[in-house]
């Protein structure tokens, strides 16, 4: 087994500290921006390609706001509202971690939808493109979670278990790495294969992303220690799994609706 000894701070210049967590967001956005543009050139053709490329750079600014504001508010509301109400200044300490995927998802959906409507573009196209690039940021974010010794797993006697000294002396599942693999690498390959190789209507990939992310998140949650102040909901399901189940139900209903509309045409 391994003992976790990673420092969450990459560079410490005294009054300025560069955290791995912050870099994960910076590089996730930069690589996602580059890959999103690449996807547009491969999937969209003709005059539409130039139009969607031209506006994509501006959209990224909206996405950044959606991710940060939505992700942080989601964490505050879903996971620790009482604490942040008592200490509101803590809301702004993003470098210490504490972002909600589901909150960030809502933020990105709203910001992308508003941007697309203002620019008179098809928001479904941008949704699909974002879903192709999103696993890159998710992967880097989960690696940062691992470095921060947060979202750690349940105790295990498996040889790949890791001791997080900042938490306790128990060997635990590196659940952050499980999530990085499933929600990052596997999801990236799966969604991009479907988007680039299959001829689905725009928007369907976005719902498939929600479904597959939900499946992978729930699988990972089996090995992840629930938040101490929340525990298990109804004594058997974590809050992350519960939110993912709701997200999946929403996506499945929309997929069924899309298929029904296609059959009625």
Image: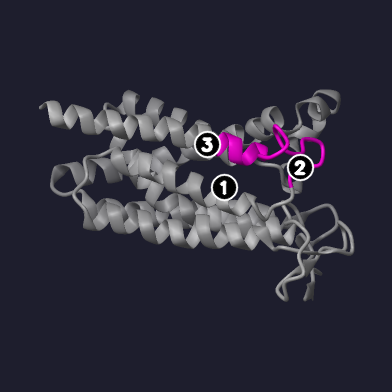
Residue 202 image offset from top left, x and y in percent = 25, 39
Say which element carries label 2: loop
Viewer-nearest residue: 172 or 181: 172
Viewer-nearest residue: 83 or 183: 183
Q: Which residue is mark 1?
A: 218
Residue 72, image quadrant: top right
- 228 w.r.t. 18: above or below: above
Q: Which residues are magenta?
A: 226-244
Q: Residues within 10 Å of mark 3 (few under 14, many from 20)?
A: some
Q: CA distance from mark 3 to mark 1?
A: 8 Å
Q: CA distance from mark 2 to mark 1?
A: 15 Å
Residue 265 visible: yes
Say which element carries label 1: helix
Mark found first going from the N terminus, 3 or 2: 2
- 234 w.r.t. 151: above or below: above
Judged by its main secondary structure, the magenta piece is: loop
Image quarter where the N terminus lies is bottom right
Q: CA distance from mark 3 to mark 2?
A: 18 Å
Q: Is residue 89 left or right of residue 145?
A: right
Residue 203 image offset from top left, x and y in percent = 29, 37
Label for residue 243? none
| Residue furthest out toward the left | 265
Q: Residues within 10 Å of mark 2 (few under 14, many from 20)?
A: some
Q: Is residue 243 magenta?
A: yes
Say which element carries label 3: helix
Q: Which residue is mark 3?
A: 245
Which residue sits at x=10%, y=27%? 265
Mark found first going from the N terminus, 3 or 1: 1
Label for residue 227? 2
């Amino acid at each position: 087994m391994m003992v976790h000894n990673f420092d969450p701070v990459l560079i410490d210049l005294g009054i300025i500290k560069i955290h791995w967590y912050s870099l994960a967001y910076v590089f996730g956005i930069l690589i996602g921006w580059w890959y999103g543009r690449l996807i547009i050139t491969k999937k969209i053709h003709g005059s539409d390609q130039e139009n969607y490329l031209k506006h994509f750079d501006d959209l990224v600014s909206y996405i950044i706001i959606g991710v940060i504001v939505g992700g942080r508010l989601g964490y505050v509301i879903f996971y620790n509202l009482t604490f942040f109400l008592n200490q509101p200044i803590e809301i702004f300490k993003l470098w210490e971690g504490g972002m909600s995927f589901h909150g960030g998802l809502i933020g990105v959906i709203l910001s992308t939808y508003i941007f697309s409507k203002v620019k008179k573009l098809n928001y479904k196209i941008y949704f699909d493109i974002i879903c192709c690039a999103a696993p890159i940021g998710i992967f880097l974010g989960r690696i940062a979670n691992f470095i921060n010794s947060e979202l750690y797993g349940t105790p295990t006697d498996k040889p790949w278990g890791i001791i997080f000294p900042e938490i306790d002396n128990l060997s635990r599942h590196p659940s952050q790495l499980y999530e990085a693999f499933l929600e990052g690498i596997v999801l990236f390959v799966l969604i991009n294969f479907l988007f680039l190789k299959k001829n689905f209507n725009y928007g369907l990939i976005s719902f498939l992303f929600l479904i597959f992310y939900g499946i992978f998140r729930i699988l990972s949650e089996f090995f992840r220690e629930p938040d101490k102040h929340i525990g298990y909901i109804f004594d058997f399901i974590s809050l992350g799994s519960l939110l993912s189940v709701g997200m999946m139900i929403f996506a499945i209903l929309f997929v069924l609706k899309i298929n029904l509309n296609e059959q009625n045409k």
